[in-house]
Image (tube, rainbow, N blue to C red):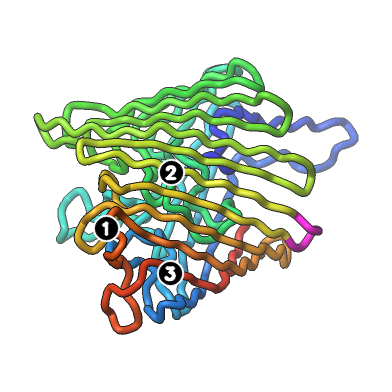
Amino acid sequence: MRILLLLTLSFVRASFAVGQDDTSPPAKPLSLSGYVDSYYFYNFNGVTSNLGASGFERIFDHNANSFQVGLAQLKTTYTTDKVEGVIDLVFGNHGDLANYGNALSPLGREFGSSGLAIKQAYVSWLINEKFKLTAGQYGTNIGYEVIDAPTNFNYSLSNLFGNGPFYHTGVKLDYAVSDKLAFMVGLTNGLDTKEDFNKSKGFQAQVFLQPVKDWAVYLNYFGSNEGIEEEKYYVKWFDLATSYQINSKTLLGLNATTGSNPTGQWSGLAFYAQYQFNDIFSLGTRLEHFDNKEGGIYLVDADGKGVSTQGITITGSFQISPNLLIKPEYRWDKYHHDSKETFQLPGKDGNLSKNAQSTIGAAMIFYF
């Protein structure tokens, strides 16, 4: 969905050459991939939910003190020299949030919510070696982390992720100037929606730079009028996502974002560091600050007032087999706003008596 492994501006084209001495069968254009993740987290506040008072303290890993299935994904990709078609379906506890904004069938509540299964569905046309045109529903360009658990190093997702766009429905054009410079522009129906509720279109843009080998920089923008009919309600994000592979063992990453709408502004910064000790074990951390004191985006307290948060996440990653990851994780987050005496999080008795929450647990991720 975002910088990690999306690399929509890479324009990597697979080529298959069969020599006279090569008896292997030709490559098939159809591929199947997917994953399923499950988790258990203990919340030291003694509660059964990591959502807090506003319901946005944690995104996706909602439940505490119980075994949970996160998401099951099944992705089908058909690739030829010029065309790539993707059908990316998801099921499970995170399926509704993966389709945030489309909780119901377009035909109405009584027809159910089958649309939740579609995480991505798009077709890309490689016009030539420089240009690629994509149309359909696809992940957003905003941010560093993505929905898919095998792709992120940390299992729990950041506040920057949870308070940003998830996906867009529209059309975008990628232009690769070289391996070190590329651009993307697109028009969408708006923010996290398959439908368009007004005459305006959302606009997205990205600049990819590779200043030196193993250093990738993405400058992102998304803006849209989310007002109904004649109402004007502009929302926008400016985003920087960058990663630097210092050596074969050490990776550093950074995500900085600022956004606004008529309600207020928000901003955030997340720093990532990972170290691979050996072929089996890696350790990583995420340090994050997210400021929504003006209440412009989702993270608010029980009274609807904006808050800010600081947090640290420490994650281990065990590569048990080529298809299995086990990730133990500890996470601490503290929430506050201008009135420091006000508590935002429920304690064991159900009352709002906590300003911070800590969780410890692990996730098991199978992927293919």
Rendering coords of residue 346 (x, y %) = 31, 74
Of the image marks 1 and 2, the number of the one nearer the N terminus: 2
Q: Dot 1 corresponds to which residue?
A: 339
On residue 26, the disc is none
Q: Does residue 268 sit above or below 46 in this rendering?
A: above
User: For this rendering, which residue is in front, 346 or 253?
Assistant: 346
Q: Is residue 146 left or right of residue 115?
A: right
Residue 326 is drawn in which quadrant?
bottom right
Residue 62 is drawn in which quadrant?
bottom left
Q: For the point 54% across and 23% down, which residue is it?
A: 126
Amino acid type for the residue under numbered disc 3: Gln
What kind of element bears circle 3?
A: strand
User: For this rendering, which residue is in front, 251 or 9?
Assistant: 251
On residue 268, the disc is 2
Q: For the point 31% across and 43% down, which residue is it?
A: 192
Q: Spot the residue most to the right.
A: 21
Please, what is the dominant secondary structure of the magenta stretch? loop
Q: CA distance from mark 1 to mark 2?
A: 20 Å
Residue neighbourhood size for the residue with mark 2, other residues' Cα within 10 Å, grouped as few (<14), some (14–19), many (≥20): many
Q: Is residue 280 magenta?
A: yes
What kind of element bears circle 1?
A: loop
- Magenta range is 276-281
User: For this rendering, which residue is in front, 100 or 194?
Assistant: 100
Amino acid type for the residue under numbered disc 1: Ser
Amino acid type for the residue under numbered disc 2: Gly
Rendering coords of residue 217 (x, y %) = 58, 30
Of the image marks 3 and 1, the number of the one nearer the N terminus: 1
What kind of element bears circle 2?
A: strand
Q: Is residue 175 left or right of residue 342?
A: right
Q: Is residue 115 visible?
A: no
Q: Is residue 328 left or right of residue 226?
A: right
On residue 357, the disc is 3
